Amino acid sequence: MIKVEKMKIEQQTEIAKNIYEIRLKGDLVSEIKMPGQFVHIKVNSANDPLLRRPISISSYDKREQTMTLIYRASGLGTRELVNQTDEIDVMGPLGSGFPVETAQGKTAILIGGGIGVPPLYECSKQLKAKGFNVIHVLGFESKETVFYEAAFKELGPVYVTTADGTYGTKGFVTNAITEFNLQADVFYACGPVPMLGAVEQQLSHMPGFISMEQRMGCGIGACLACVCQVNGPEPYKKVCTDGPVFRKGELVYG
Amino acid sequence: MIKVEKMKIEQQTEIAKNIYEIRLKGDLVSEIKMPGQFVHIKVNSANDPLLRRPISISSYDKREQTMTLIYRASGLGTRELVNQTDEIDVMGPLGSGFPVETAQGKTAILIGGGIGVPPLYECSKQLKAKGFNVIHVLGFESKETVFYEAAFKELGPVYVTTADGTYGTKGFVTNAITEFNLQADVFYACGPVPMLGAVEQQLSHMPGFISMEQRMGCGIGACLACVCQVNGPEPYKKVCTDGPVFRKGELVYG
Amino acid sequence: MDKLSVSLPGLDLKNPVMPASGCFGFGREYSQFYDLSLLGSIMVKATTLEQRMGNPVPRVAETSSGMLNAIGLQNPGLEKVINTELPWLEQFDLPVIANVAGSMTEDYVEVARHISKVHNVKALELNISCPNVKEGGIAFGTDPQTARELTKQVKAVSSVPVYVKLSPNVANITEMALAVEEGGADGLTMINTLVGMRLDHKTGKPVIANKTGGLSGPAIKPVALRMVYEVSQVSSLPIIAMGGISSAWDVIDFISAGASAAAVGTANFVNPFVCKEIIDELPRILNELGAAHIHDLKGRSWKVGEIANHRA
Amino acid sequence: MDKLSVSLPGLDLKNPVMPASGCFGFGREYSQFYDLSLLGSIMVKATTLEQRMGNPVPRVAETSSGMLNAIGLQNPGLEKVINTELPWLEQFDLPVIANVAGSMTEDYVEVARHISKVHNVKALELNISCPNVKEGGIAFGTDPQTARELTKQVKAVSSVPVYVKLSPNVANITEMALAVEEGGADGLTMINTLVGMRLDHKTGKPVIANKTGGLSGPAIKPVALRMVYEVSQVSSLPIIAMGGISSAWDVIDFISAGASAAAVGTANFVNPFVCKEIIDELPRILNELGAAHIHDLKGRSWKVGEIANHRA
Ligand SMILES: Cc1cc2nc3c(=O)[nH]c(=O)nc-3n(C[C@H](O)[C@H](O)[C@H](O)COP(=O)(O)OP(=O)(O)OC[C@H]3O[C@@H](n4cnc5c(N)ncnc54)[C@H](O)[C@@H]3O)c2cc1C
Ligand SMILES: Cc1cc2nc3c(=O)[nH]c(=O)nc-3n(C[C@H](O)[C@H](O)[C@H](O)COP(=O)(O)OP(=O)(O)OC[C@H]3O[C@@H](n4cnc5c(N)ncnc54)[C@H](O)[C@@H]3O)c2cc1C
Ligand SMILES: Cc1cc2nc3c(=O)[nH]c(=O)nc-3n(C[C@H](O)[C@H](O)[C@H](O)COP(=O)(O)O)c2cc1C
Ligand SMILES: Cc1cc2nc3c(=O)[nH]c(=O)nc-3n(C[C@H](O)[C@H](O)[C@H](O)COP(=O)(O)O)c2cc1C
Ligand code: FES
Ligand code: FES
């Protein structure tokens, strides 16, 4: 069930340049079904910014009723979110995430770009718990925006790339996959759309799951703002309800 | 000189129902010329609420560089002001206040209605310091919104009225002036416009000064939002620069 | 509850609050949050003769106290709406207002003819004002003659009363209102969105793929209120008002301006419970204002004298 | 500083930033905050033939991300403006744009004839769009023929270039722009305010004594931007844009939409330093965008291909 709840802000920290980790507590956590789902956040009670902001659930703890989000403070809304200290209006959990329960194989590769990295963390934890070997390829802009490298390392190998070469492999996630000749049975990817397209091409030989982004209104499937083009009889699917996670091959890249 | 300054919020307390006292510290205080001046406050950095809010300076301490404002949290802006804890964007001091320096006589009566009471406090303190006997008539809605009675009592007698009769004299400030047959050489009044009109009529036999309210845009005389009708060749004066304090007889009451 | 009941052509409403078209789909999604039978009515997403894909993405952008949208009337088409969406709504005690759109007069007429025969459709809302359809939608909404003519033709085939949805993108809103009144409209709904745009800072290009979009939300409320105020004084048609409504006080404002009922659009995205919360809140406000019925406040912004009793 | 210099008919501007008419008086008040010579230009308060008292109070009301005003063109009249206000501005290195208003064509023509002869007045801004003047101001702004005719007559007597200020309260802004271009306008300024209103919750009556007022501020920026985008693609006249500008990025947006310069209105009330701060900030943004001159960004929202070099 989707809840709308004022969640308690237990902690908020800047973990890399303009990248914030926020831990929230509330009943809503009980409703989370799978990694890769997201929440829709009203950053304050004002009319400006007006709309909610979609942010992925990075990890969650059902016993503690807490979840952690990681976001980049860039625009009006996310910058305002940084100022919040007490509680915050959250709608969720939303969408359908990474289908870890039905995952097949022995080795999974998780590929994240920038603020696409967060939802992969819970995904990796759950795959690891299922007995998978997990390999991570995490792409960032530059050294100062790298986050969660250590956390992922606890689960499995981590390959970091930076676009400007200030840390790890210079270039994109696809460069690291080639350079280190990374092999797996299934992939999970989240990041900017060009990255997703490149990854699908590069890893066309294995099954995979892709988390999409799109500008949203309602977040629950009513306004038709967040559609993406798919292969099949229905020309569009909605990122907020049909996604954000899609099966490899489903999406049509413009 | 008018300053625009992020002033430090030293303290903020609810002193009566929905009535807040806030103490601010900053250079701006050095510029205050007289009691009855006001400041124009941007309650947050958002576009909504958009405009600044005019609030009178209730008292100030030049040595400490602090000033105290008292406001009623009623609409969008003042309710948002309550939430501020750190610093606040203040423009001021603005307008021309009560001309205490040139005051003549022995006894002054200060008449305030609701959130018109605050600027009279500094006015009374300065009159008292000049050797005046100060009498105060303070009108409120009801018992729970009465504030600063004790503070004024330290300066001189205080007559409180409440519209609903839950405290002090039932009725308006004019009722108390009649009931207690209050006499003085000069009056200073601030409050809702109907009160000001009634006071001018009742005290037509003595000189007096009246602080007006009007909706404002700029607060500095440029936008012509805040005009009030006056007797004389120029049909209008601006509350923000020509006032807020006017001489008895100057104003035309609609 | 009788404090809130409102009777309009074709519509006997428990209360004057309903979601605005395009902001509530066909109700399915919001039925997760509360019982839709609570609503006065529901204005469903625009229906066109054939299925529409809508516009490319991005379709929405945020602005100060507002949002832009260019969904482009994506909908499953008349047949699917009649066979799937409207029957699903039958489970609720809820009169439906069907939003009818098209590119040419013939499209409107065909959709209206069929959809007006569906059991739970109690009124049509003629969407002559959608700024996001290129082929002519906008022309209907800004030219009085065309609007009158279209209204006439739709009225001729509709089995239920016809409300015409006015565009705010005109110099003279009363002229448009009077034109569709002449055309035989049973009511007005107003306003649709203002045409606006937002640019991406880096590229300088429009954020919305369709370039321009329709501006909705609190930012446009002052314009909507003014238009309802103007039209309600010259037209005898009842008005269902919308434009930036997100609280019960906003509803009171529009009723005071002269509307008979109010619709909530963008605010549903911010707070999925908003319509229910407004309906719960209204009686308290009526008490505070000493109004026995919400229509005692109708038009008080321009009516001379005291609050009238609507049943007097 | 050359990154920002802009040359327009009658106006050689150090930079494309200026306060909008009515939001900066005749400069006196804001000269307390910074040296007005920093500004590109100044659009002074509307001047009419005779002194005007303006409207009763309240004259302003706040709305979501916007404000309504109905000042009603209060001003000391042509003679006093020429003898007192404009000479005072001579102390600054500052070309003045004189905002000309009136009720009838004759008024406009008379004011234009005389004010355009004043030494520091380098251009006129024909205010055909003030929504707060009842006698006909609004008609000029929404009827293309009338607007063209007025422009022609003012052009015939003006000693300096004439910019016409367009009203956004029209269905077709390009039609208005082309009409005044035909009338001989040298430039456009846009937009004036949208007509809106706010009601008092308790009484249900309009907050503003004039009932309706002009909506300005960030709320209207999307509409203003769209109109500049549309007009700049069809008219060859330079545009000075306004509507919700409160930051340097807002200026960039309007230049990207196709404007040549930008004016700041309501934002002055919020931050008296805003024009200066924008001027200080612009060079940094140009660097960030890799633009050698601000006009390299002009019209990039609709221009095909790469950033053009404006001197190429
Ligand atoms: C399903 C999903 C999951 C996401 N998860 C995360 C996450 O875990 N961490 C994170 O930092 N970001 C995440 N994003 C992106 C995040 O939603 C945007 O960065 C954020 O909305 C930008 O808001 P702003 O206030 O900073 O920017 P503004 O420029 O003020 O935003 C203006 C409007 O555009 C929308 N918008 C702007 N950029 C984006 C974008 N990239 N995607 C979608 N909408 C956008 C905003 O939501 C808002 O409506 C996710 C997006 C989606 C769709
Ligand atoms: C010179 C002056 C001194 C004042 N001193 C005080 C004071 O010391 N303490 C205090 O509590 N109040 C004072 N006021 C009144 C105070 O400015 C308003 O109560 C306040 O602006 C209301 O803002 P809001 O956010 O609560 O209401 P909203 O309803 O959100 O206000 C909307 C708009 O209307 C304006 N407005 C609403 N009511 C008034 C009003 N009564 N007067 C002027 N503008 C108004 C607001 O400034 C804002 O622009 C003073 C007003 C003036 C003009
Ligand atoms: C995402 C979105 C989709 C819309 N779709 C339609 C539509 O299909 N038909 C229609 O008549 N109006 C449509 N509208 C306009 C709304 O019904 C309403 O008139 C407008 O948004 C103003 O109300 P608001 O400010 O409460 O949103 C849409 C608005 C939005 C925001
Ligand atoms: C208080 C006020 C007074 C105004 N007076 C005038 C005026 O005298 N002449 C004019 O052409 N425009 C006038 N305007 C309109 C502005 O010049 C500007 O076109 C409009 O406010 C939009 O810009 P903004 O959103 O930056 O304020 C006035 C606006 C405001 C807010
Ligand atoms: S955001 Fe509204 S349908 Fe997805
Ligand atoms: S508030 Fe602008 S002139 Fe007084």
Image: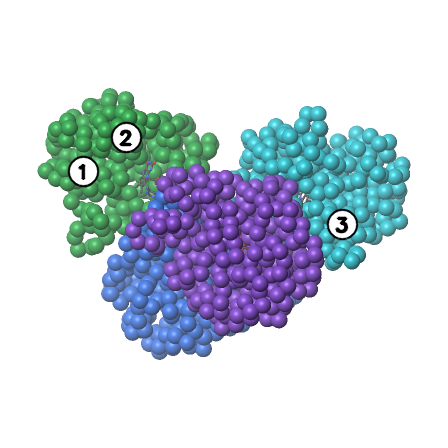
Chain colours: A green, B cyan, C blue, D purple
User: What residue is drawn where x is 56% and y is 43%?
Assistant: D38
Residue at mark 2: A164
User: Which class describes the residues within 10 Å of circle 1: few (<14), some (14-19), or many (20+)?
Assistant: many
- Callout 3: residue from which chain? B
Q: Quadrant of the N terminus of chain B?
A: top right
Q: Is residue A46 visible to us here?
A: no
Residue lying at the far left of the rendered structure: A205
Residue at mark 1: A199
Q: Is residue A122 above or below residue C103?
A: above
Q: Amino acid at mark 1?
A: Val
Q: Is residue B135 above or below residue C45?
A: above
Q: Which mark is residue B195?
A: 3
Q: Amino acid at mark 2?
A: Asp
Q: Nearer the viewer, residue D82 or C65?
A: D82
User: What residue is drawn where x is 15% and y is 28%?
Assistant: A179
Q: Is residue D298 visible to us here?
A: yes
Q: Is residue B89 above or below residue C226?
A: above
- Callout 1: residue from which chain? A
Q: Is residue D110 above or below residue B198?
A: below
Tell me where residue B51 appears, x and y as whole percent: 57, 46
- Callout 2: residue from which chain? A
User: Which picture quadrant has residue A165?
Assistant: top left
Tell me where residue B57 appears, x and y as whole percent: 69, 37
Q: Could you tell me how far apart the alpha carbons at marks 1 and 3 are, in whole angstroms?
A: 74 Å
Q: Secondary structure at mark 3?
A: helix
- D285 left or right of B248 in image: left
Q: Quadrant of the C terminus of chain B?
A: bottom right
User: Which picture quadrant has residue A63?
Assistant: top left
Q: Could you tell me how far apart the alpha carbons at marks 2 and 3 are, in whole angstroms?
A: 69 Å
